[in-house]
Image (cartoon, rainbow, N blue to C red):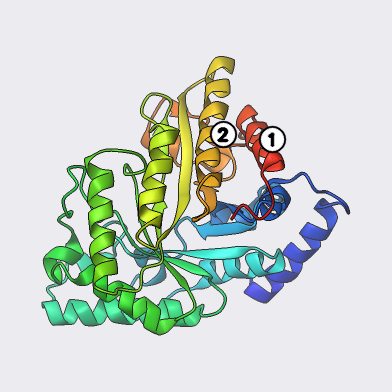
Amino acid sequence: MRPRALAAVFALTLATTLPAGAADTLRDLARKADLHFGTAVDVEALDSDPAYARLLAREFNLVTPENALKFSVVQPERGRFDFTRADALVAFAEAHAMRVNGHVLVWDQQLPDWLTQGHFSPDELRAILHEHIRTLVTRYRGRVASWDVAAEAVGEDGKPRDTFWSRGIGPDYLALAFRWAHEADPQARLRYNDYGGEGAGAKSDGIYTLVADLRTRRVPIDAVGLQMHVSLSDAPRAGDVRINMKRLAALGLQTDITEMDVMLPLPASRAALRKQAVLYGGMLQACLAVPQCRSVSTWGASDRHSWIPAFFPGQGAALLFDADGRAKPAYFGVRRILRSAKAGKH
């Protein structure tokens, strides 16, 4: 379906699923707290599952494409760009007054074979990456509010990760990527996004060192994304997350919780679901306590479209809504906290 046709369908969907005066959805409560509450979107499901589309429209005011803007999807052959899925998501977001976060310009995964199996010089790789970033960011200039410019460039030990881009271009590839993205859209908010560095520890310190260096060099970076893929047994302390956000804020950076999910052993027990709700609530409260925390996003809207079971067999039930779109204890806990949040906190 073409983007304009999709926009018309989605506008009708919203009109028929959001009754006048509905004010207790996550998106409405987040807006009153001056916060964006978002989710990652499976564009194929968006096109085929009307209930999924209705859930997205009702509860979220920020969307991130789960895969639609990743390198292998959007440029499967050198110089041939396919924006079909990304255009559909942007059309959906515009029809529902949602912000769009672009994801992801520079990452070591989901790269096409023509790129990883090619034999390119550093100058050629620089030109390829520059063209890729310029093409994507320019196409959505003024329509995509923020970009995950780079992701997962720091190892578990806090040192720079050895990646396809660092090997091919050199350590300056990150600074180049941010500068190229800024040139393509000076108004877009530019973010570094990573997992495992949300609280305290070597990786958190490594991410801090990386972004502090970029700030010192006047690289145009605006924010840090804390992914928050966790379980009940390995989640950071909410207090440590708050401290980490504050030290990033002291660098002049905003922060976001970008990809939160809390996986549980299946089938999920009532006790586990209650603990999951506490964990979601604690991280939201950490964000609300730091004015520079601008958004909270889950990595998927419902368990039906979660990535967890495929990658962690026996685990799942990680999101705010179950596979049938029913709200879970975590949803009601998050909603309760947002309802009590003071307007203008951010």
Determine if residue 80 is in view: no
Q: Quadrant of the N terminus?
A: bottom right
For mark 2, what is the residue?
281
Rendered position, 118 above or below 209: below
The residue under label 2 is which amino acid type? Gly
Determine if residue 257 is in view: yes
Q: CA distance from mark 1 to mark 2?
A: 9 Å
- Counting from the top left corner in percent of width and height, residue 144 is at 53, 71
User: Is disc 2 placed on a helix, strand or loop?
Assistant: helix
For mark 1, what is the residue?
336
Q: Earlier in the sequence, mark 1 or mark 2?
A: 2
- Counting from the top left corner in percent of width and height, residue 297 is at 53, 49
Q: Residue at x 12, y 73 (%)?
A: 119
Rendered position, 243 above or below 276: below
User: Is disc 1 placed on a helix, strand or loop?
Assistant: helix
Q: Is residue 151 left or right of residue 326?
A: left
The residue under label 1 is which amino acid type? Arg
